[in-house]
Image (cartoon, rainbow, N blue to C red):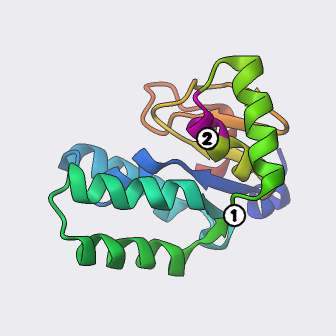
Amino acid sequence: MSSTTNRTMRIGLDTNVLFYAEGLNGEVKQRAILDILTALPQDRIVVPVQCLGEFFHALVRKGGYSRREAQLAVMAVQDSTAVADTTAEVLLAAADLAAQHQFTIWDSVVMAAASRAGCRLLLSEDLQDGFTWSGLTIANPLAAKIHPLLESLLH
């Protein structure tokens, strides 16, 4: 893959990546995720709006954040990344993905939104590493063996 492709590739982030970056699942995962995120071209990072909602919920429920603190954390992510909207088209694509591949509708919405936003890569620890759909590949950023597409962005 050319370095030009690497500089222009859009990368989606799943909710768990946001949660780990916030440091709420231990310092080891936080450091690993922050190292990856700082190595990526910041103007190419996309977060599906579904993930922002899930992030807010997780911060309040699991992170012990007040709703105001969670709101500020979500706003910080929104201000520093592109946000992929959930549209009727995204929802229809997500329903198709869920029906064909047995994903939950919510995971499917995340993947469909990232795909429609032009992402080639979606970083997620929860989804199936290496799964490819509609030009989007899932990569687990914390896997022992880093997906080649992610590896190409980091070096």
Q: Amino acid at mark 1?
A: Asp
- The circle drawn on residue 151 is 2
Given residues 33 and 105, the one toward you in this image is 105
Quarter where residue 1 is shown: top right
- Prevailing secondary structure of the magenta residues: helix
Would residue 77 appear left or right of 147 to someone viewing this image?
Answer: left
Would residue 118 appear left or right of 98 to someone viewing this image?
Answer: right
Would residue 132 appear left or right of 46 to someone viewing this image?
Answer: right
Residue shown at 54%/32% (left/top)? 146
Given residues 28 and 134, the one toward you in this image is 134
Quarter where residue 6 is shown: bottom right
Q: Amino acid at mark 2?
A: Glu
> In this orientation, does residue 19 appear?
yes
Extent of the magenta region: 104-108
Across and down, in percent, residue 15 comes to 45, 49
Residue shown at 51%/34% (left/top)? 140
